[in-house]
Image (cartoon, rainbow, N blue to C red):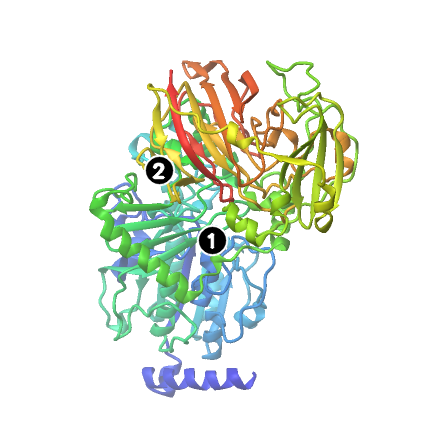
Amino acid sequence: MNRFRLVRFVIVFAVTWLVFGGVDAIAERPSILWIYVDDMSDWMGCYGDPIAQTPHIDSLAQEGVLFENAFMPAPVCSTTRSALITGTMQTTYGLHQHRTMIKKPLPNGVVTVPELFREAGYLTFNEAKDDYNFERDRNLMYSSEFTRPTRKQVNAHMIGREVSWLKQLQGKPFFGQIQLKGGKIEGETGSKFPAKSRVPDDQVAVPPQYPDHPVFRNAIARHYEQIAETDAQVGAIIAGLKEFGLWDNTIVFFFTDHGSPLPRAKQFLYEDGTKVPLIVRWPKSMQLPRGKSRSDLVSGIDITASSLGLAGMSVPPFMEGRDLFSEDYEPQEYVISARDRMGNAIDRNRTVRSATFRYIRNYKTDRALYQPQYRDKYATFKTLRQLLAQGKLTPLQASYHDAAQRPEEELYDLVNDPHQTVNLADDPEYASVLKGHRDYLQQWEEATDDQGRYPESEESLRLVYESVTGDCVSPEYDFLKIRKTNDNGSEANDGAGDTTSLQPKAEKPKSKPKIIQYPDALVWTDAKLAAKEFPGFEFIGEYSQGNRFLQATPSGKRFYLSIYQGGLPGTGWDGSRVDHEWVELDAMKSRLQGWEKIDRSKNVVGKQPPDNAVVLFDGSDVSAWKNAKIDNGTLQAGAATKRSFRDFTLYLEFMLPLKPEPEISHPHRGNSGVFAVGAYEVQIADTFGIDPDPLAWQEIDLLKPVDTWCGSIYGIRAAKFNMCLPPLTWQSMEIEFKAARFENSVKVSDAEISVIHNGVKVHDQFHVPQGTGGGPAGPRPEVAEGPIYLQNHGNPNRFRNIWIVTR
């Protein structure tokens, strides 16, 4: 034992001596047992649930205290468990990613709670699940003299009801954990249909965040069955403690690591994901109140501090939890929970829970709430996708699948809206409530240096990507993705056989280029500022010299030149081979001698709305939009219309940022998009000055296939011409759209789309065979109507002069 640990042991020992009365009392110190359950909600008799069959859990509440408002620091196992075992928020020491691919030791001075108990003379054990997001020698945490049960008795979780291995604890104060499967018994809740349950499906209530469908009724009934079986296991543990003479000196903490595996519960920050049962049972000899309930707000990390406190041990300064039973305890006004990467799905969300409200802050609104993840194969998630495609979900239920419906802030009145279905964040009546929760979150993030604010390392993301290849659709993985261009293109309604089409003719085999991330790349959104700060700004653009035309685009400290004959794409180019050059920045001035700079942008913008148009954005009024932010009279990416549309002509103008450091065709250069009815994306990206001819790829590493260039129908069909103009110039796009038609939820005709990009028609009545998008979740579900969504893909794209004519 090193000196630091020896000193701490002496202090802990002395405190215990004083609290429990000397040598004789040391042997009588209370043991602490955590009954730690996976994936289970508080649907129990002691919590007022009339269907639940939980007599043994209820008996724990009768012999101690039940906490009505206990919330875990995260809605998933590894982050919650990392927090509780250290008594700190997982966000404080970088333990917040589920699961952490590169596990590091805990910082100096931070230890686990079983180590503190060991140093105080306790025997410690955990049977058996750890699941921590840090590296720690298990031999430091758990006593070597404890004989672990066989794998037939415990295998990650306790199997069945056999607890004879508890006998060895006789005569020893212990701190132990027994892990129960809970909502994972015989498979996670909702993973299979039908699943057996002692509770009939027609007796359960389906909350409004889910469809009232046989699969969901069965999943809810199944969770009641899992709770009943868990209760039986709790009964076996109680019986074992009594049989071996341990019951009268053992404090039992019963709790779960987060809510059930139903779709909007596990992994999400609503009540059903973070709220858990918490019961603390103590022996009669402790002469503490029994059979009581407390309504104060509790964080899961308070369990850690309270366990130490009830054992007469001091709570070390690094711990952030509170001892719920200390004399100086004061209830807290707010409790924080956090959600970051969930396996392969990258997100960042924080929630603040007060007595009657829940506030949620979503930092990545460019992605839907439900991202592809391991539960996609479950019966519940399959059913949701099927019903979404059939248009049978309510607007609330459908919104969880749609990035356009993702708000930055959510606020729910839990008294009048316990299932959190009505977002009050935009309601002026609740402005002060919203501000109070928002301010508290901001103060907490800064005070704790919330590590979720910092991006995950490329090395870690690479390990995630390699472990679940094909499932990683979050844009943070773009630097790892190499998509091959579709040789054949898509079946077209226009431009068939046209040699000027952007459909590639042949692909020359070559090694895959490496996509490098540029998280700190310089970016400009103002041309005047860029002219002062970026030395090559004056050279960006289009030029003419007789019958030859040139486009110059920056790539780091070099420029890529494309030289055309007869005109520029869409305006005179004869379709002949394009010549290319790489020119160093300091040579650009001499290279462009004799060339005249031209500006096509002034002729392609400024179209005014007709009398029958609905003006969606005029530079100041954002009443037609959700998640709208104005920057100097322009609308920032990430907004979605409040109204849904079906058939229409949409006109808008957009400006791409200047981001010269990523190489040309890099996904990080101005990536955005316009989504028609939330399902079909017309791509916006900085693809200015690059040539789709595969032979040109000898000179550049093409990082984005042509059907994802500006003006394309994303991933389905390339534009007829690359009409993208230089960044920091205004461009126009006019989309004529006819929605898909459905009869009895079956599609009878495709959506139809025409696109005019900067005055040139690049798609003409193209029949879109499916929604756009990719990854394991497949294309976006097609719908009969929906909002217009201006995608935020991490780039400061801006929009103006937006209007629509419905048909």
Q: Residues within 10 Å of mark 1 (few under 14, many from 20)?
A: many
Q: Residues within 10 Å of mark 2 (few under 14, many from 20)?
A: many
The one nearer the camera, 673 or 631, is 631
The one nearer the camera, 427 or 201, is 427
Q: Please report the residue visible at 38 percent of the width from the left and 20 percent of the height from the top.
A: 805
Horizontal side of residue 465 vs 314, given as left or right: right
Circle on res. 417: none
Task: Tell me how far mark 2 sits from mark 1, CA to CA.
Answer: 33 Å
Three-letter amino acid code at disc 1?
A: Cys
Horizontal side of residue 526 vs 260, given as left or right: right
Q: Position of residue 64 (x, y in %)?
A: 27, 63
Residue hosting label 1: 77
Q: Please report the residue visible at 65 percent of the width from the left and 27 percent of the height from the top.
A: 568
Residue 242 visible at all: no
Horizontal side of residue 744 vs 148, given as left or right: left
Is 249 above or below relative to 436? below
Q: Position of residue 776 (x, y in %)?
A: 57, 34
Q: Please report the residue visible at 40 percent of the width from the left and 14 percent of the height from the top.
A: 744
Which secondary structure lies at badge 1?
helix
Q: Quadrant of residue 23?
A: bottom left
Three-letter amino acid code at disc 2?
A: Lys
Which is more foreground, mark 2 or mark 1? Answer: 2
Q: Quadrant of the C terminus?
A: top left
Q: Quadrant of the N terminus?
A: bottom right
Q: Position of residue 157 (x, y in %)?
A: 50, 54
Horizontal side of residue 703 vs 12, given as left or right: right
Which secondary structure lies at badge 2?
strand
The one nearer the camera, 227 or 263, is 263
Residue hosting label 2: 626
